[in-house]
Image (cartoon, rainbow, N blue to C red):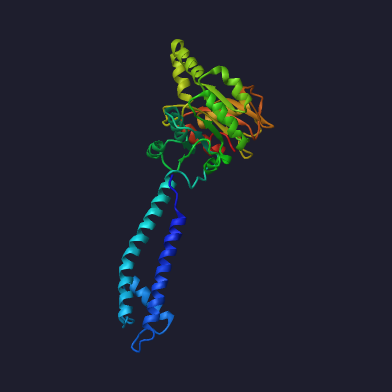
Amino acid sequence: MKSINYLRIISVTGGVVLVYSILLFFFYRIEQPHPEAHIETVGDVIWWSIVTITTVGYGDIVPVTEGGRLIGYIFLFLSLGTYALIIGQIATIMDTLKENRKLGQFGTKFSSHVVIIGWTEFGKAVTDQLVGAGREVAIVTKERNNVDLIREFYNTRQVFVLFTDYTNFDQLTKLNIEDSSIVFVNLYDDTDKLVYILNLKKHFGDLKYVVTLENANLKSTFQSAGVTYAISKNELASKLLASYIFEPDVASFNEEIIAYADTDEKYDMKEYLVLENNPYANQEYGQVFYDLKKECNVILVGMVKVENGNRTLLKNPEDSLVVAAGDYLLMIMNRNGEKNVRKRFKTEEGLEG
């Protein structure tokens, strides 16, 4: 990360102004007393200096003494060096600003986005799924080379990258982390993840956190530390592998529905918040099930009741259960079904806020 040396710029600028002021002072003292001088006031001196420095050369004011001409020569040669200096400083400043923007130092205005701490191949796979689902993602990496890779892979309107040390918590505010929907801590070691989350919660305690674990036995430890979701990669992989062994078609379908559906041939499970103006608010679950299948060609498989911040997942509940505003509905759908649901629900998929 580059920084602009403002002290050097101020020092150089001050030195140039001082030298020019001294030269102008002597030029005025030498030229003004001469009977044929074109210099009569300080304003004339300033006008002559501007015309000379800019190499415009109107010729309305010219030195008539030997000393004045000598200072004129100095002005002309200094002007060449001054131009080079100014252009060099401007180029340096522009280059620094461009580099700092590339490294994320100007921050992002993303909201309800996903923050990923640490960049790995697994993190890229997760980002691919999130971007495919239309989510905004802010990534933190401490490896400079990763910045170029991330910017090459993704559109900057959807993926923001910040180059900084993970423990520089003040820098994390540039991610607009306080307004994120969840923070995925994607470090390599489980112990490092736990220590990092404990420190991170001291600065951002009200956020939701998710981690993937190499050791499934640590799941309760992470949950006790305040992690919202602790997922064992080995546990998920073993379940999917076992399913492929004895029910491969179910395994294939399960693998498909936990990803995003990018074609009408693929299906995905999504959840949508029921707003106050939702046509299904205050209707029975069974009626909502049949109507969604008929009108949107999607399958309702469950719902989530949210009370006092606690989420209760209800899998295929009774038909008589009433769907209320603030509930989430879980549905299996393809891309065309998603378009229909979005029109009816008037909101994007996923958690709100």
Residue at (46% x, 17% y) in the render: 251
Residue 332 in the image: above or below residue 174: above
The C terminus lies in quadrant: top right
Q: Quadrant of residue 55?
A: bottom left
In front of the other: 306 or 281: 306
**Residue at 35 percent of width and 85 percent of height:** 38
149 shown above or below 4: above
**Does residue 11 lie above or below 302 as drawn?**
below
Find residue 242 and report its horizontal and vertical position in percent.
47, 12
Q: Is residue 120 visible?
A: yes
Residue 346 appearing in the image = no
Q: Estimate the x, y position of residue 272 in percent, counting from the top left.
A: 56, 33
Q: Is residue 221 above or below residue 163?
A: above
Where residue 156 sits in the image (x, y, percent)? Answer: 43, 43
Q: Is residue 35 left or right of residue 221?
A: left
Q: Residue furthest right?
A: 308
Which residue is nearer to you in this view: 309 or 258? 309
